[in-house]
Amino acid sequence: MYEHTLQEINKADWELAHCLFQCVTVASCPLCVKELAEFLTFDFNMRPIPRFNEGWCLEDPIYAVQSTCPSFLALVDIRGSQIIQFSHFSVKEFLTTSHLAKANQEISCYHVSMTPSHTLIAKACLGMLLHLDENIAKDALQKFPLTPYAALHWVDHARFKGVLQNIEDGMNILLDSSKSHLVVWVSLYNTELPSWKLFKQGKRPLPPSGNPLHYATICSLHTFVKVLVVEHPHDVDSQGFDNLTALHMASLRGHEEVAHVLLEGDTDVTAQNDNGWTPLHVALREGHLQVVHTLLEHGASTTAQDKVGSTPLHLALRSRDVKHPHIYTVTVVQMWEPRMRMRIGWHSCMETYKLTCYLICFPKRQVLKPPTILLSVECI
């Protein structure tokens, strides 16, 4: 049945249809019809990043999208937004199956492969962001419906396996602090960090609060972080966002692989921000245990004091200061155990160190494997 539907698609429109199938399949969130139609305005023959052509914008995007393959694509209204999705979940399964990939050339060209599809969307998103410049005002962005999706989700597609090497040139341009594109993207990219500034109504974008390494770290682009560490070693310990280094950012977001790359690049593991927090303070507060272990393995100090005198160990013991207090009790015992040279059961640990209120949520006699960095009992 589905094979017959593909055969009915106008041969002149097969590339357009395939592009739509790819976008609907791997989009990070449902695409409204105007966003989806804007993918059709890129010249994907341009290298390395496709060029956005305003003259290719469709007068009737709904008709253009739906008429391509009405049996596969459906228009639905979700909270006032016109969303394009597959007419049935089995359509996606059919388009991504190896059976279609091995079919005859007439229909196998519609097969949706994950890496090429993510690459296509990542390139289109970068093409859109590189089309904008710092002189554009927020009001003018309404002419480019794909812009919000591009700013928020190009990284999602860039992180997919096998994509990064195909978009490296465009990514280098976007994250080049000497060009205006970084300013525009940062202004559009909403994050949880209070120091990140968004567009104000009718105003131009504000300058970024960090360097390219900060943003590559936040986006967990560890391969690109590795390149930046080598090419711009002076940026490794530079501070932005209320005096946070890239390692602070990796600790804040829980990006253990990026933290490892930065630490191998000789970043300062003891750097402190305005509050006196080291990356270890930050990782403990946010509950990122794998990052905590990585920092400890690279010499992070467990006794460094912030401006109010709190050490990472204090944070580990203050349940009101952390998001997951039980995790940090585990970390504390792990830091003690190597020096104690014995396998500590919860009962004896509670008796010796009076940590009853922090350990009661754990099974008794649970044994932990320690990290390599030691913490003396005298620090308590």
Image (spheres, helix red, strand yellow):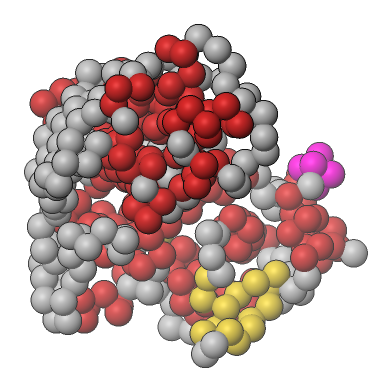
Looking at the image, the residue that sits furthest to the top is 341
In the image, 301: left or right of 211?
A: right
Looking at this view, is 352 or 112 the one in front? 352
Q: Position of residue 35 (x, y in %)?
A: 46, 71
Residue 365 location in percent, x, y? 67, 29
Q: Position of residue 162 (x, y in %)?
A: 52, 33
Q: Which residues are magenta?
A: 98-103
Residue 140 percent location from the top left of the image = 22, 78
For the N terminus, the quadrant is bottom right
Residue pictured at 38% horizontal, 74% vertical: 145
Front-most of 73 and 268? 268
Is 100 magenta? The answer is: yes
User: What secondary structure prevails in the magenta region?
Assistant: helix
How many numbered callouts? 0
Above or below for 336 versus 252: above
Q: Most extreme residue toward the bottom, as rendered?
A: 80
Vertical order, 295 against 220 (above or below) = above
Taking the spot 64% from the left edge, 83% from the top edge, the residue there is: 76
Residue at x 22% of width, y 18% of height? 266
* Left or right side of 251 for 341: right
Say if 46 sits above or below 24 in the image.
above
Residue 186 falls within the magenta-colored stretch: no
Q: Residue at x 57, y 27 (%)?
A: 348
Residue 298 in view in this figure: yes
Q: Residue furthest right?
A: 1
Q: Can you say whether 265 is above or below 162 in the image?
A: above
Q: Quadrant of the C terminus?
A: top left
